[in-house]
Image: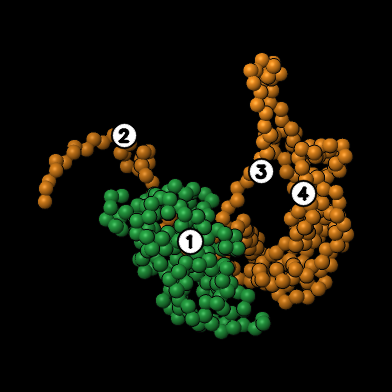
Amino acid sequence: MTAPLPISLDVNGERVDAQVLPRLNLADFLREHLKLTGTHVGCEHGVCGACTVRLNGEIVRSCLMLAAQAHGASIETIEGLSDSGEIADLQAAFRDRNALQCGFCTPGMLIAAQDLLKQEPEPDRERIREHLSGNYCRCTGYQAIIDAVETTARARTGRKP
Amino acid sequence: MTSSPVKPQTLSVLDRPNSYIGKVVPRPNLERLMQGRGLYVSDLELPRMAHVVFVRSPHAHAKIAGIDVSAARSMPGVIAIVTGEELASVITPWVGVLSHLKGLKSALQHAIAIGRACWQGEAVAAVVATSRAAAEDAAEIVTVDYEELAAVTDMRTALDPERPVVHASLGDNLAFERNLDAGAVDAAFAGSDEIVEADFIFGRHTGVTLEPRAVVADWNAAEARLTIY
């Protein structure tokens, strides 16, 4: 089974129709076919979290999924979440706290953090750490990231920063 | 609305225009990185860009008796397959010594192994193709005929006389030695009330970035210009 397959899906609110090889993973499809290069490919085996995207509202590792499996699904990437303004406050907190250096992990980190804040509006630092434990950062260190997520959680629930 | 008295502002030398001392300096490139709109090496796509995949040694020490690339060369998308000998005609070997570590020894290191692989993962052949997938497909069917050699895998026994010398040109397996002698160690131990002994084993430390280490090079023959990203 190596012939291209037709797929249709929704990516950041836009309908996408494409022909993909069965072995093409979702991360490579987003990056190479749709040029949405904000989804990063780090370890390519589901460990680093840099390729995190939203699939039907749930976060997934796009390197562990085939593009063909996303047929009929709704995908949101960092570009979509940025343009909709959904995570503008979280991004501002990352900027204010300088919670990134090279930025390679940041899109995945933001999507994972937003996932937590949607499920639990008031997570403590331990919960934030636990939820982000599948997202690796190799330069800034995690303190500033945890700070930024905590600050955003507090601001969203009207608590003191 | 309540009004609070405005604090008189005292300006200091640090408040001069363009003074960064004591200030939080915003980084102008953060927005694009946070929006997934940065530009990393793997995001680059140039016209007619080729991709390289390396065939690597599964053995820590092995003689390379032969490399058969004929089947791989006929795979779709393959542009070139090169071995160590071929690359050696255009790339001089590297000698990995450091001027601040005087006495550090290094054998000649070729871009791709020639005749012998000295560590697991050493590149043995390079497959260049129109896409990474095509290069990986072809790399899988490059066949290398290895003759395994005795390997040196433990630093604590590497200098034992029965261990093979990995690089004959270096004479032994000792790359570098530095002794720190602050003096009277034996006397200090002899005069101690108690001696605690422990072995410490350290893994190799190195920077391992999340962004894969990658390079894109673009040769413009008309301008004799090589652009390396």
Earlier-in-chain disc, 4 versus 2:
2
Q: Quadrant of the C terminus of chain B?
A: bottom right
Instruction: Provide residue B143's location: percent of width, then percent of height.
Output: 82, 66
Instruction: Classify mark 3: helix, strand or loop.
Output: loop
Q: Judge left or right: residue A125 versus residue B48.
A: left
The amino acid sitting under disc 2 is: Val
Q: Position of residue A119 (x, y in %)?
A: 38, 63
Nearer-the-camera pick, B117 or B97: B117
Q: How far across and how far down the image is residue A34, in percent?
A: 51, 74
Give the color of chain A as drawn: green
User: What amino acid type should be assigned to the residue bearing mark 3?
Assistant: Gly
Chain assignment, label 1 = A
Residue B109 - label: 4
The residue where tag 1 is placed is A108
**What is the C-alpha distance between the residues marked 4 and 1?**
38 Å
| Quadrant of res B64 | bottom right
Q: Label the orange chain with its letter.
A: B
- Label tally: 4
SS under mark 2:
helix
> How many other residues sit within 10 Å of disc 2, few (<14), some (14-19) or many (≥20)?
few
Q: Which residue is mark 3?
A: B203
Marks 2 and 3: same chain? Answer: yes
Cα gap from disc 4 to disc 2, whole angstroms: 55 Å
Callouts 4 and 2 on one subunit: yes
The chain that hosts pointer 4 is: B
Label 2 sits on residue: B13
Q: Residue at x 30, y 55 (%)?
A: A155
Task: Write down the chain letter for disc 3.
Answer: B
